[in-house]
Image (tube, rainbow, N blue to C red):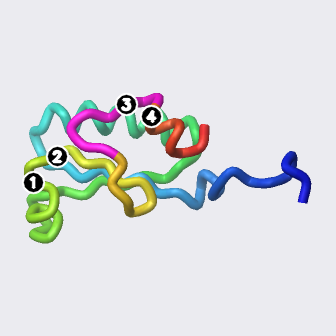
């Protein structure tokens, strides 16, 4: 297949960004704003998980929230860089 027709990676709708956070967390709110913007512009679905409602997430990520996963793998924590997230999602 010609390089012009090769896909760089999964289609945007086949990706998933997960924000792991907690209520009343200003860093989580900042992260969500970046995720909403980037995912909305790129057509990538995203979800929010509350660390206070899931013991496994709490044990794994409590000291890092907010945590952002891309396709189930940790992408970043504490602060979300818009440019880095776009690059990860193939923009």
**Residue 21 appears left or right of 19:** left
If you read the primary sequence from the N terminus, does the residue marked by circle 3 or circle 2 appear first?
2
Q: Secondary structure at mark 4?
A: helix
Report, in whole angstroms, how far the alpha carbon at label 4 lies from the one at label 2: 18 Å
Give the residue at mark 3.
81
Location of residue 79 by image quarter: top left
Name the quadrant of the C terminus: top right
If you read the primary sequence from the N terminus, does the residue marked by circle 4 or circle 1 appear first?
1
Q: Which residues are magenta?
A: 76-83
Asked if marks 3 and 2 touch (Cβ < 8 Å), the reply is no
In the rendered image, residue 6 lying in the magenta stretch gets the answer no
Picture residue at 9% right of the left edge, 59% below the top = 52
Give the residue at mark 1.
62
- Tag shown at residue 84: 4
Picture residue at 49% right of the left edge, 53% below the top = 45
Asked if marks 4 and 1 touch (Cβ < 8 Å), the reply is no
Give the residue at mark 2.
65
Q: Position of residue 1 (x, y in %)?
A: 90, 60
């Amino acid at each position: 297949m010609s390089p012009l027709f090769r896909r760089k990676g999964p289609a945007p709708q086949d990706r998933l960004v997960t924000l792991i956070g907690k209520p009343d967390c200003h860093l989580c709110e900042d992260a969500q704003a970046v995720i909403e913007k980037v995912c909305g512009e790129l057509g990538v679905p995203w979800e929010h998980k509350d660390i206070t409602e899931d013991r496994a997430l709490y044990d794994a990520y409590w000291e890092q929230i907010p945590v952002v996963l891309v396709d189930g793998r940790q992408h970043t924590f504490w602060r979300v860089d818009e440019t880095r997230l776009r690059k990860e999602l193939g923009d």
